[in-house]
Each structure stands twice: as structure tokens, then as C-alpha cells.
Image: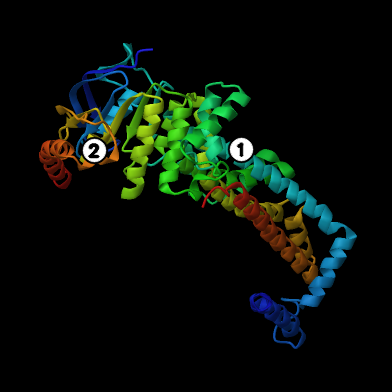
Amino acid sequence: MATGIQFSAVTHTYRPPRGKPVLALDGVSLEVKEREFLALLGPSGCGKSTLLYLLGGFLPVENGDISVGGKKVQGPGPDRGIVFQNFALFPWKTVRQNVLYGLEKQGVARPERERRAQAMIELVHLNGFEDSYPSQLSGGMKQRVAIARTLAVEPQILLMDEPFGALDAQTRALMHEELLAIMRRAPKTVVFVTHDVREAVYLADRVAVMSARPGRIKEIVDTRLPGGTNPEVQQTPEFAQKVEHLWQLVRDEAIKAQAQATHG
Amino acid sequence: MILRFLIRIFPLVLLAGLWEIAPRIGWINPEALPPASAVAVAWYRLLMSGDLVYNGVSSLINVSAGLSLGIVVGMAAGVLMAWYPAVDAAVSPLMKSLYPMPKSALIPVMILWFGLGAGSKIASIFMGCLLPVVLSSYNGARGVEQTLIWSALGLGASRRRVLWEVVVPGALPEIMAGIRNALAISFILLVSSEFLVGQRGLGYLISFLGDGGVYDAMFAGVLTVAAIGFFADRVYLFFMQRTLQWRE
């Protein structure tokens, strides 16, 4: 099944319950190739998460078009798994029950879903915590549960909304390695929203830099590095160069975004 | 541990001691406050005669019926209001106009509509319990994080399943706090509606004994209602903490 993603002239207006409408995205066109890891990089409030929610089918596409494998996105679907910054685990369910939820919804038979849930829990190294509630886990563990829950239904596309933004630096670095290891075992098309330049360069094949509100694609940068992706690559001059280049692009937009935030 | 317990019950023991002594040595008119021992004896007599059990059971049935009805209707209304804007638009003006009304003022209306028997009591308790449950369900359901709902939808749940499997459990902590308020209100409305009319129930027993001037027995009835209310709240609290044990 084809999993390439096509955004064509996507424009989105955010209408708050009170106050005037805000143009969040303005004519975004972008292509994500099959099994590509694409990062959406931009200052806060630039609409990068909105773009992800539109792709997820959580918000209606009002202007323009988003298609996955040539098919228009119309509502959420298990072909696109999403991981949120705030983990979004069901707090009244245990780790195992959280991971099982999607498999139940997909109608997977009981023995099979127990087996697959256990395999996912082992994949994210949470053996022994199957019967813990999310409130008993650390942030990094919670996000590993969320990843396991999302991957359990085997989506072809993984949407990640600043997934490691709420974690401390060490945990974040470990999660980067875990995510890359998982992607090497079962490659997927990934759209990864972040405002962390180093994270974007390290994880992604390409980085799409977005402008301050209204969000537009400012530039797309190829960030594949010679020697592949491993922690050592972050010490190379090539890596530093890419980070510097992207940081220059993002900085102007971040300053604009700050001005927007202070002047309303 | 034992010392702590003694310190905690000391004020109660002191109060009981004062209650016994003050009417006996003439600090307080024994007509207005019969001594504790006299109330205890009266309570034992009421229990043995069967009056306490007969009226107590009748009251408990009314409270359970009114409260259960309030919980079921209140949860359904509150959650559906939060989930469907059309239901919200249709129902919320009604709820808002009922909100500031003292529910005991509705008792005469309920008597007019549902008669002098159990019906009017159950209806009054229902009216009193309804709004706290509606409001807590509404606020609880609206407070469920958007990303939780999206996660379930993304994993393949239908909107209807999401309502049952995410919105209701997500709102449960608030709903259960609202039910605890409703439980307290239900006893207030029970006793006041039984004071007004009827031939059975603890409220009826209290007012009957009071009118007859049997004050030690009347106090026994009041204490029984207070004890049942306190006990019901403790049992509910225990149940609530067990149900919500997934919280930190």
C-alpha cells in the first residue's frame, strides 16, 4: 500500500469560540515520500501541529487537499498513528490495557492481541510495568507506552506532535535512539513536528521549515548525513553545519512569532 | 497510634459527657435537651418496637430511588450536553433556570403532582440530586482532553464508542464528586419532604415524636438520620476511592 503524503495548497483558519478568526496555515504544499522521515520545524504558533492534525483527520480540511497514497484524507484512521506531546494515555487503563485498546478496536482476536500487546511492551522495554497505571510512570515511560499503543495497530504512517518536548534532555536523547531503532526494524513514513533544530536534523531525512503565522513552507532542507544516523554523527562538522543553516532559517521566524505573541 | 485515636475522640467524649450532665444538674432545661442516657434508652426502645426499622427502611428506599434516578438522568443529560452541541442548546436553558431555585421549594409542587406517598418524596429527592450530577458530568466531560479523544478515534474507535470508553471514564472523577454532593442533598430533601406530609419515614417519625412531646425519642430519631447520612457518605467515599484508584 502506498503511503506517500501530498499536501496541496492547504489553508486553514482557526476560529476561536470568542474572538476573531486567525489564519493558521496559508497555502501549504508539501510532499512526503514513502518511508521518509520528515520533520516540520517552526516557531510555536506557526501551525505545524495544525498541519499534523489535518493530516490525522482530526480537523476538517476546508481549503486545499491532503491525500495519503493518492486517497483524500477524510477523518481519522488507523493507517495514521499519532503520538502527542502530553502522551494522551488513558489514565484509568493500565499499560497493558492502553496498548490493547487499538487492537480491540481493530477486531484482533484475543490471543493474538495479547501476544502483540506483549511484544510491543517488550519493544519499548516496559516489561514488568504491564499492570501499572500511567500515573505511576515517569514521563519517558509514559511516552514509550504511547508509542507502543500507536505502533500496536501497525500504522503505515506515524505522526508525532513534539513527542519528546515534555521530557528532560537525557531521556529525550535515549528516546531518539529507541525511536530510530524501532524505525530500522519496521520502517514507516514519519511526520515529526518539533521546534528543536538539533532533534530535527538528527532524526529526519528532510526538514521543512515553516514561517511564523500564517504558516507557510519557507524552505525544505535535506538533512541526511554521511555515515547515517548514530549518536556520533552529532559531533561531525556536517551536522553542525546543517544545524547552523536551519537555525538561521528558524531564528527570524521565531523573532516574528515572539512579536506576534507580545502584540496579540 | 492509640494516643492519636484518644486525642481524636476526646472532643466527642467531652461533648457526650456535657450532654449527660448539663440537663441533669439544671444548666439546660431537660425538656429542650434530654440527657444522653435518656436518648440512648429511647433509641433502644424505638429499635425494639420496630418503629426505627420500619421508618428507616421506607426512608432508605425513597433516598435510593430518588438518588439513583438523579444519577442516571443527570449523567446522561450532562454527558450528552457536553458531547452534542444541539443537546446543550436545548437542555441548558432549562438547567440554568432550575439552578438557583432552592429545591425544597419544589416539595409542595411535587406533592401536588405525585401525591402524599412515596412518589412525591422520590420526585423531590430526584429534583435536588439532578443538578449537581448534571453539572459535574457536563464539566467533567468537557474537561476530557482533546488528545485523549483523538487518540481513541485514531486507533479506530467510533464516535459513539469514544463517548462510552473515553468521555465517561475521563469525566468520572468529577461525576463522582458531584454524586457525593447529591448524596448529601438527598438526605436534606428526604427529611424535609417527610416532615411535610406522609405516614412513614424517619422525617415523619421525628416530627410525629416532636409533636407528641416525646423529646428523648425525637432526639433519637434525629441522631439516627445524622448517623445514616454520615455512614452513607463514608461508604460512598470508600467506594469512590477504590473506583478512582488509578489516580496518583
Q: CA distance from mark 1 to mark 2?
A: 60 Å
Q: Is residue A67 visible?
A: yes
Q: Position of residue A103 (x, y in %)?
A: 53, 26
Q: Position of residue A25 (x, y in %)?
A: 20, 28
Q: Position of residue B50 (x, y in %)?
A: 87, 57
Find residue A233 and name its label: 2
Find residue B72 and name its label: 1
Q: Is residue A15 visible?
A: no
B16 relative position to B137: left or right: right
- Residue plotted at (29% across, 21% down): A61
Q: Are marks 1 and 2 on the same chain?
A: no
- Residue plotted at (49% across, 39% down): A90
Quarter containing the N terminus of chain B:
bottom right
Residue type marked 2: Val
B53 relative position to A246: left or right: right
Q: Which of the 4 image quarters holds residue A253?
A: top left
The one nearer the camera, A35 or A42, is A35
Mark 2 closeness class: few <14, some 14–19, many ≥20 residues within 10 Å: some
Q: Position of residue A224 (x, y in %)?
A: 22, 29
| Foreground tag (1 vs 2) | 2
Q: How is the image coloured?
A: rainbow
Mark 1 closeness class: few <14, some 14–19, many ≥20 residues within 10 Å: few
Residue type marked 1: Val
Up-down: is B228 above or below A180? Answer: below
Subunit of label 2: A
- As helix, strand or loop, the secondary structure at mark 2 comes to helix
